[in-house]
Amino acid sequence: MEKYNIEPYEEPKERLDYKKEDAYLRAKKRVEALVGFYWHLAVYIVVNLAIILLIGFNSSTFWHFGTFATAFFWGIGLFFHFLGVFGPGFMFGPNWEKRKIDEYMEKERKYWE
């Protein structure tokens, strides 16, 4: 004859499904971004290699800026695509500083032993 049934809070099943679906959609979007970057990189390599070879075979002067201009400027765009996909923290991520500190401390420890 209990008036209020007080049980520990449990998340509804629908909410758990929503979290899983949301995580899946985020992961899928990330994978699509990675695939897009790798395709961009592959096309960059193939097209620029073809352009450089064509210019090399059909020009008397190979070593000038015009030969590599497309690769250079497209490379800038590819670099920004890389940053957009992998993030600016790719090289200097959150663990980078800690790893470097540990590395220098280990060097100091070995020096003083």
Image (cartoon, rainbow, N blue to C red):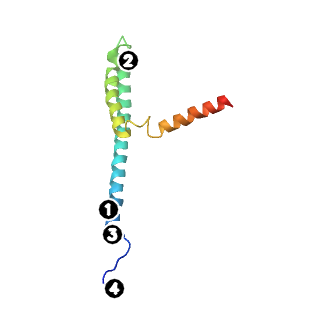
Disc sitting over residue 57 in the figure: 2
The quadrant of the image that shows the C terminus is: top right
Amino acid type, label 1 = Tyr
Q: Is residue 90 left or right of residue 104?
A: left
Q: Residues within 10 Å of mark 2 (few under 14, many from 20)?
A: few
Q: Nearer the viewer, residue 6 or 59?
A: 6
SS class of the residue under badge 3? Answer: loop
Residue 84 picture location, percent across and down: 33, 38
SS class of the residue under badge 1? Answer: helix
Among the two numbered marks 3 and 1 on one chain, the one whose residue lies closer to the N terminus: 3
Q: Residues within 10 Å of mark 1 (few under 14, many from 20)?
A: few
The quadrant of the image that shows the N terminus is: bottom left
Among the two numbered marks 1 and 2 on one chain, the one whose residue lies closer to the N terminus: 1
The answer for how far apart the CA atoms under marks 4 and 1 are is: 33 Å
Amino acid type, label 3 = Pro
Disc sitting over residue 2 in the figure: 4
Q: Residue pushed farthest bottom? A: 1
Residue 26 picture location, percent across and down: 34, 51
Front: mark 2 or 3: 3
Residue 104 picture location, percent across and down: 56, 32
Disc sitting over residue 12 in the figure: 3
SS class of the residue under badge 2? Answer: helix
Q: Is residue 111 left or right of residue 40?
A: right
Q: Residues within 10 Å of mark 3 (few under 14, many from 20)?
A: few
